[in-house]
Every structure is written in structure tokens, then in C-alpha cells.
Image (cartoon, coloured by chain):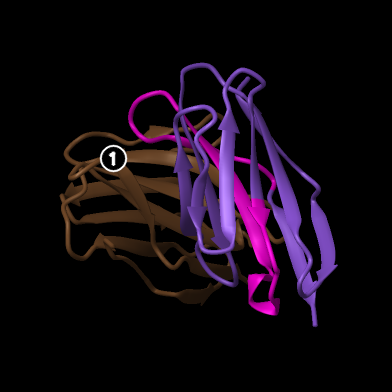
Chain colours: A purple, B brown
């Protein structure tokens, strides 16, 4: 059975800290891994990763994929209170766009 | 980026009634849309894949007679929760798949359903 596991499930840090969120997966027919940020409503897209070892960056956020070890990390540097959210990792398994989501990591950034 | 809307954004209904939720791709055509359900403090669970002009494909454990999906046009998919029960109360989110320039999935804002 395909599965995506995220860790930790929750995390509390202070502004300015750096955090690393983890996502491991076991899926047949892997196509891509995606990271989303979810605040009160639907998820917003952060990154899509398809190749191992190539870091994607957007401001203070970065992510990398290891297809050999079947995991990805999402780094957030110099965290701000606005980074507080649930971060979801999803894997596209097979053609057609079907996504399998992990449980999410709830990040809380304290001032 | 592409925009996906959902209507209504929230709905309260009585047990035993049916509720229809619409998902629209506003500025692109989507042959494929997805319906997810999210319970509090849990992740998104895929319910079904909706393909324009054909029957939806339901995930294991999702009752197709209870959650009716219709994808009648390239910009609209609907999910009807029939004979709703309190345990159907959840956050329902749709997404639409673009095919140009690449296959990307855009999420709607979600519909909060409460069944009393």
C-alpha cells in the first residue's frame, strides 16, 4: 500500500529559528513529490520535486528530494510567525495526478 | 496561477438531506478534477477522481452511491453528499489538473460541511 509519512507531527519554535520538516514515502510508480502549506483553508503550493539532489528554493524555504532513500526535507530558515501553518507533503503516484498526502506537520512559530 | 473556486464555502444541513458542492476551474479547462476530504487535525484523503465525460473513479472505502460525482463540463465538477449524516461533517476540497503548460494541480478553497 502506498504511504507517505511526515515527521515531526508538530513543532513549536521561536522566531528566527531554522526548522527541518521530513517526509518519507513508499509508493509504486513515483512521479513527483510536492510540498504544500495549509493555513485555515485549502493547501497552497510550495514546491514540486522530481529529481534527486536538486535543491529548490523560494525565499527562506528550500526543499530537496532523495529518490534513493525515498525522502524529502523542507527547510525554513529565519522563521517568522507567518510561517505558522500545517505543512503537507504529497506524492504523485502514477499517471493522472493522483496525490497521496502525508499526515502533515503542524508548525507553530512563537514571537 | 490558475484559479479554482468552490461553492458554497460552508453549509449546514440536517441529517438525511443531500448537499451539492460545486468545483469550478475559472481560467482553464480541466479534464480531471479530484475530491478530497479532510477531518480536523488530519490530512487530505483522496475520495475520487473525476474525469470529464466519464464516470468518477472512487478510492477504496468511499461509497459511490453516497458521494455522487458529476463532471459534466471541462470547468465544473460537482460532489453531492446524499442522505448526509453527522459523520459526513468534514472539510471537502477539490482540485483541478491543468495540462498546459505542465500537469499541475490547483486546489479550491474548500467547503466546510456540518450535518446536524
| Residue B26 place in picture, x, y as percent | 21, 65
Q: Describe residue B46's horizontal placement relative to residue B77 as left or right.
A: right
- The residue that appears at 50% across and 35% down in the rendered structure is A54
| Residue A67 place in picture, x, y as percent | 57, 22
Q: Chain of mark 1?
A: B
Camera-nearest residue between A76 and A108: A76
**Splitting the image into 4 quarters, where does residue B108 fall?**
bottom left
| Residue A59 place in picture, x, y as percent | 52, 64
Looking at the rendering, in which quadrant would you find the C terminus of chain B?
bottom right
Within-10-Å neighbours for mark 1: few <14, some 14–19, many 20+? few
Residue A12 sits above or below residue A67 on the image: below
Q: Which residues are magenta?
A: A75-103
Residue A23 shows in this picture: yes
Q: Is residue B73 magenta?
A: no
Which residue is most to the bottom? A111
Residue B115 sits above or below residue A88 on the image: below
Residue at mark 1: B103
Camera-nearest residue between A41 and A26: A26
| Residue B64 place in picture, x, y as percent | 44, 38
Q: Describe residue B32's horizontal placement relative to residue A22 as left or right.
A: left
- The residue that appears at 70% across and 69% down in the rendered structure is A79
Looking at the rendering, in which quadrant would you find the N terminus of chain B?
bottom left
- Picture mark count: 1
Amino acid at each position: 500500500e502506498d504511504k507517505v509519512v511526515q515527521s515531526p507531527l508538530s513543532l513549536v519554535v521561536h522566531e528566527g529559528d531554522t526548522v527541518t520538516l521530513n517526509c518519507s514515502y513508499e509508493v509504486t510508480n513515483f512521479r513527483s513529490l510536492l510540498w504544500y502549506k495549509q493555513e485555515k483553508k485549502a493547501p497552497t503550493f510550495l514546491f514540486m520535486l522530481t529529481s534527486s539532489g536538486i535543491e529548490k528554493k523560494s525565499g527562506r524555504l528550500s526543499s530537496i528530494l532523495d529518490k534513493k532513500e525515498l525522502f524529502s526535507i523542507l527547510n525554513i530558515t529565519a522563521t517568522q510567525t507567518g510561517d505558522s501553518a500545517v505543512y503537507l507533503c504529497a506524492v504523485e503516484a502514477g499517471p493522472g495526478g493522483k496525490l497521496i498526502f502525508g499526515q502533515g506537520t503542524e508548525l507553530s512559530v512563537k514571537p | 496561477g490558475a484559479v479554482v473556486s468552490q461553492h458554497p464555502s460552508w453549509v449546514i444541513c440536517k441529517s438525511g438531506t443531500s448537499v451539492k458542492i460545486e468545483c469550478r476551474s475559472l481560467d482553464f479547462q480541466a479534464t480531471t478534477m479530484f475530491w478530497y476530504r479532510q477531518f480536523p487535525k488530519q490530512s487530505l484523503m483522496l475520495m475520487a477522481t473525476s474525469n470529464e465525460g466519464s464516470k468518477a473513479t472512487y478510492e477504496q472505502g468511499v461509497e459511490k452511491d453516497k458521494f455522487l460525482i458529476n463532471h459534466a463540463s471541462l470547468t465544473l465538477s460537482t460532489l453531492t453528499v446524499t442522505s448526509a449524516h453527522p459523520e459526513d461533517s468534514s472539510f471537502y476540497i477539490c482540485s483541478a489538473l491543468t495540462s498546459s503548460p505542465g500537469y499541475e494541480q490547483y486546489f479550491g478553497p474548500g467547503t466546510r460541511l456540518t450535518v446536524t
